[in-house]
Image: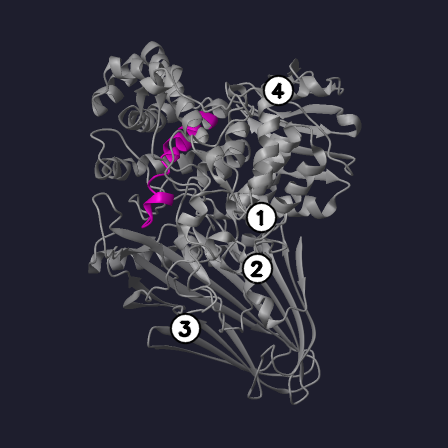
Amino acid sequence: MVIARGESPAALKCTESLFTLGNGFIGVRGGVEEDARSTAPVVHLNGVYEVTPITYHEKAPGFAEASDTRIPVPDGTLIGLTIEGEPLDLSTGTVLAHHRWLDLRTGVLHRSLRWRSPAGRTVRLATERLVVEDHPGPVVIQYQVTAEDFTAEVVVDSCLAPHQPPAADAAGVHDPRVGPQLAALAFRRWIVEDGIDGMVLRTGRSRQGVAVVMSHAVTLTGGGPVLVNSLRDQGIVSHTVRATLAPGAVLTLVKSVAYAADKGEDSTPADDALAAAAVAALRRATAIGLPGLRQARTQALQDFWLSSDIAIDGAPELERAVRFNLFQLLQGAGRDGLTSVGAKGQSGEGYEGHYFWDAEIFALPVLVYTRPAVARAILEYRHRTLDGARAHARAMGHRKGALYPWRTIGGAECSAYFPAGSAQYHINADIAHAVRQYMDASGDDDFLVRHGAEIVFETARLWLDMGHYNPRRGGRFCIHEVTGPDEYTAMVDNNLYTNAMAQAHLEYAAEVAARLGREKPEAFARIAAAISLGAEEAEGWGQAAAAMYLPYDEASGLYPQDDSFLDKKPWDFAGTPANHHPLLMHYHPLVLYRHQVCKQADAVLAFCLLPHRFEPEAVRRSFAFYEAVTVHDSTLSAGVFALLAARLGQMDKALAYFKDTALVDLDDLHHNTGHGLHMAAMAGSWMALVQGFAGLHALGGTLRFTPTLPPGWSGYRFRLDFRGNRIEVAVGCDAATSYRLLAGPGLALSHHGQVVHLTPTTPEQVAPEQVMEGARHATL
């Protein structure tokens, strides 16, 4: 449970993000109903965006032409309360008590308020808010007003209104992490049916449509008349309830708001179909009623926690934080195969709602082991946008294959700054890595044949086109002029992360081609014919992988981040003012590029994802080096450092980094939670615990664990799904570990290299800690 008490108006923007509710499609920020002054849009729909042309004063071939920018849709959470002419306003009168709490078991946001008006009338307010689980399930708000010490007319105004962009925020106008404010959706027509009011709107360029409708149910205890009327004017729908309340009387309003979206034609039939879809969703929900909707939402979350719950004995604050992070990641993940996980989910306007590489490298591993159907849907989105990736590859000068855009919604490249955008070719390998991780955990050959193989093959083609066998490197396969995950070091040769991930990508592409050719020849022939894939090309993948150059410096015993990193001037960390962080907000990119400074984990991430490719002692030395030059200006960084520190046995450091990633939003550690939650950092807390402390590594189709116990903890446990099995892993004192099969046919897993068998007849095995420190490090 996440609780906020006695909030000041200045703190509301941060808690609006924290109290976001969603279902993968709708995201509703957690503002209070009466506050129409929020500077942030309140409601976003996953995948609904406007196209914004990008203007360059100097332009070259392949530059992004436009950006997909997610746009706010009409806000249905607004409810105003007036008592005998006095509006309820937290900045006036007296707040006697104000609590809000988000229940992670039910998905309901609760609010309790006692407020005394300037004239001395005391009112109690209790609200519940939930977003219905099923796509495109409505938002439902129960708004309950109780008179304590007065008899007077109470007016409740419930509105449906477009978001009005505020004046430019001087503090954030130059922040590249925040997208532009766009004009509102264009009004098309009203929706008026029995008890239902709403509107249809469309974007100007993308031609996407949105329909939103609302309905109300009103009850009054203690008798008396209730007057209701509706008004539609200037794109705003108002529903007004008037009643006279005596002490103890309770007025209850239940408001339901449904959204529907399409990518259809700008036509009357399309508008009518969209309106019908929203009305149907609303009628389904109101027919069930609030108690039934609450029960369905609770049941859905119970199912989620059965497969994903985490407990930490001895660290309740961190336990709550990881659970909160998992809850919000689930809410932000698209589930329809048409959408993915935005950097902020649907919790805020940061990064324009774009999907990045972190959907596959950070969010997807969590979903693979807790919600595999959602993980598959996210990968299906990548297949759906494969034509956009092919077009991007052509724009970048490649004759065949596909290059996924660095940031996108609709499938086109949206990054106007190519050194930290399109140059990050590693996104191809990241997506292929995600396909492999999903396949290893699921064995879902249907996905591989329908979607996965084509993704892996088309993206693998890019490496042979952009890389080459370099005689100056002994004929090794080299990749030049790319940017790795560290965006403070751009346009380099042989970025270690990129080369290592490309090597794994090429190996996997060759393996998939060989396996499908052997086991599913008809399917492979169909895929190969569709993309004109010849046998010699698949052979070339394996050859390039075998010859891949991975930088290593013999003199220092380090894995350099790239060919030039060790030659650069070290950054003056001691001389950098504290208020000059993050560095990207205060220094020209070229200043950063020419120095030895990392924004986030780069080579360190390669060590985490591909531990078998690197020599353990060199990894240990390299970790110490990169720890000293990384400023962690990206929220992605702390979780990766926690993961590797845990695998290296540096548990104090691992725990400190783990706290940073677990609490990044709950404690607003980067001072921008108000722009939306950090989905990848939230996922990073799960990765640090499960893949770091517990040592989970499963590439190859076998679960492997090397559990350790952080200082101050007496134990921890977690659940995950793997190949039709649900297991619970519990690590106790001295890292003694029990493995329990909760459901499924059974499996064999590895504990510090020893095989553990779980079957329905022997569902639990206890494996004591018995591995020396040096042997544990060898698992890297």
**Is 82 drawn above or below residue 704 in the view shown?**
below
Q: Amino acid at mark 3?
A: Ala
Answer yes or no: is residue 304 visible.
no
Is residue 418 found inside the magenta-colored segment of the image? yes
Question: Disc 2 versus disc 1: distance between alpha carbons?
Answer: 12 Å
Q: Nearer the viewer, residue 398 or 568?
A: 568
Callout 3–callout 4 Cβ contact below 8 Å: no
Identify the magenta region: 415-437
Principal secondary structure, stretch drawn in magenta = helix
Which residue is tagged 1? 573
Nearer the observer: mark 1 or 4; the answer is 1
Earlier residue among tags 2 and 1: 1
Q: Position of residue 486 (x, y in %)?
A: 46, 40
Earlier residue among tags 1 and 4: 1
Q: Nearer the viewer, residue 549 or 315?
A: 549
Is residue 7 found inside the magenta-colored segment of the image? no
Left or right of 707 on screen, residue 537? left
Q: Amino acid at mark 4?
A: Thr
Left or right of 732 on screen, residue 358? left
Which dot marks residue 779?
4
Callout 2–callout 3 Cβ contact below 8 Å: no
Q: Position of residue 570 (x, y in %)?
A: 52, 42
Which residue is tagged 3? 167
